Amino acid sequence: MFKKILLAAGLLCLTGMLSACGGQTEQKVTEIRVAFNQNENHPQYLAMKDFGEKFEKATNGRYHMTIYPNGVLGEQGAMAEFIRTGALQMAIVPGSVPEGYDADFAIVGAPYLYDNIDHLEHAVMGGVFDELFSSTDKYKFRVLTVYTAGERNVYAKKPINSADDLKGMIIRVNDSPTYVEMTKLMGGNGAVMAQSEVYTALQQGVIDAAENSELVYRDFKNYEVAPYYAYTRHIVHPDVVLASTDFLNSMSDGDRAIFDQLIKESTEKEFTLFKEAIEQAKKDTEAAGAQFCYPDTEELRERCMPLLQRIAEQSDVTKKIYADVTALREGEQS
């Protein structure tokens, strides 16, 4: 892994030098290097690519964006350090990455905080997280926005129509104490393993179920060995867009205003693209034989409430975010 990080850093430095050389005969062009661990067809990639093209055009070519997809620059946890040192300008990473610097970020992806993707979108666009996001400047990066990675739902070899159906099931989860505790509260037992290992583990009976979005369910063909996809809606997954504060502070006021507006527009675009991708993934897996279940999510939310409340009570910041997100839910229901 260390060698991979060194190679990635070398690649980034080389790119920066080439960009600077080209600027000797033309106007100065600032290269925006963005790390991303998914492929070029992913909604997050498409939204960021659209943002980069619009920002380049709006600034008359003073900025140019290059996105490095498929995790070619290394594992996601290292990307914040690349940004802090100036090797990268931006990255799209899980919310757990800034959580490694500030525990308050756990609230952004807390279990059963949101009803659905629209609820998360309203919170993001309504500025619920703005104070928390700006607080990371002291780490030399700014959290600009949230891009959704969809809902995480449970899929299994048997139908899941109620919370009781999860009792005793071994469910694959991410390497996260929060996810393990959440699964236990839901009635199952969390088994930590890489997503790439899930298909074989389901096939061989090592695990009974897994949890992820419809896109992952389709793309890893997990529907072949776990044909029942249950909308437990336990996590509405937030990935975050990070940017170097040195990079942000290097912009003129005019360019920064354009940048901020286009980031906001890209957030709306990403949510729209992801919701469209979910519908297509659902159609694809249903055509392949998957069946969809709709258990009572309120029952599951009640089971996980002790965990959610503990995360929400961490600080004054998390208390306010929890109250604001809850108010959005109540406002939608009224």
Image (spheres, rainbow, N blue to C red):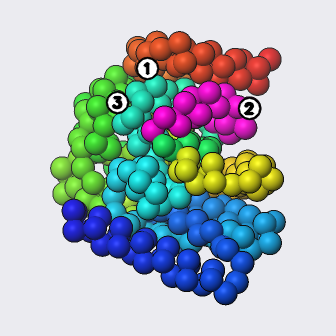
Q: Which residue is mark 1?
A: 311
Task: Determine the image quadrant of residue 29.
Answer: bottom right
Q: Is residue 132 magenta?
A: yes
Between the residue at mark 3 and the residue at mark 1, the CA separation in whole angstroms equals 9 Å
Q: Quadrant of the C terminus?
A: top right
- Magenta-highlighted stretch: main secondary structure? helix
Measuring 23% from the left and 41% from the top, which residue is drawn there? 191
Between the residue at mark 1 and the residue at mark 2, the CA separation in whole angstroms equals 21 Å
Q: Residues within 10 Å of mark 3 (few under 14, many from 20)?
A: some
Between the residue at mark 3 and the residue at mark 2, the CA separation in whole angstroms equals 26 Å
Q: Quadrant of the N terminus?
A: bottom left
Is 327 left or right of 105, judged from the image as shown?
Answer: right
SS for dot 1: helix
Q: Position of residue 127 (x, y in %)?
A: 70, 31
Measuring 80% from the left and 72% from the top, which residue is drawn there? 60
Q: Earlier in the sequence, mark 3 or mark 1?
A: 3
Amino acid at the residue labelled 2: Gly
User: What is the magenta range?
Assistant: 119-139
Amino acid at the residue labelled 3: Thr
Asked if one can make out residue 202 in the rendered structure from this viewpoint, the answer is no
Task: Determine the image quadrant of residue 57.
Answer: bottom right
Q: Is residue 331 above or below residue 228?
A: above
SS for dot 3: helix
Asked if one can make out residue 327 in the rendered structure from this viewpoint, the answer is yes
Task: Determine the image quadrant of residue 324.
Answer: top right
Which is closer to the viewer, label 3 or label 2? Answer: 2
Q: Which residue is mark 2?
A: 126
Q: Position of residue 186 (x, y in %)?
A: 37, 26
Q: Could you say which disc has been placed on residue 178 in the image?
A: 3
**Circles 3, 1 touching at the beta carbon (< 8 Å):** yes
Q: Position of residue 176 (x, y in %)?
A: 31, 37
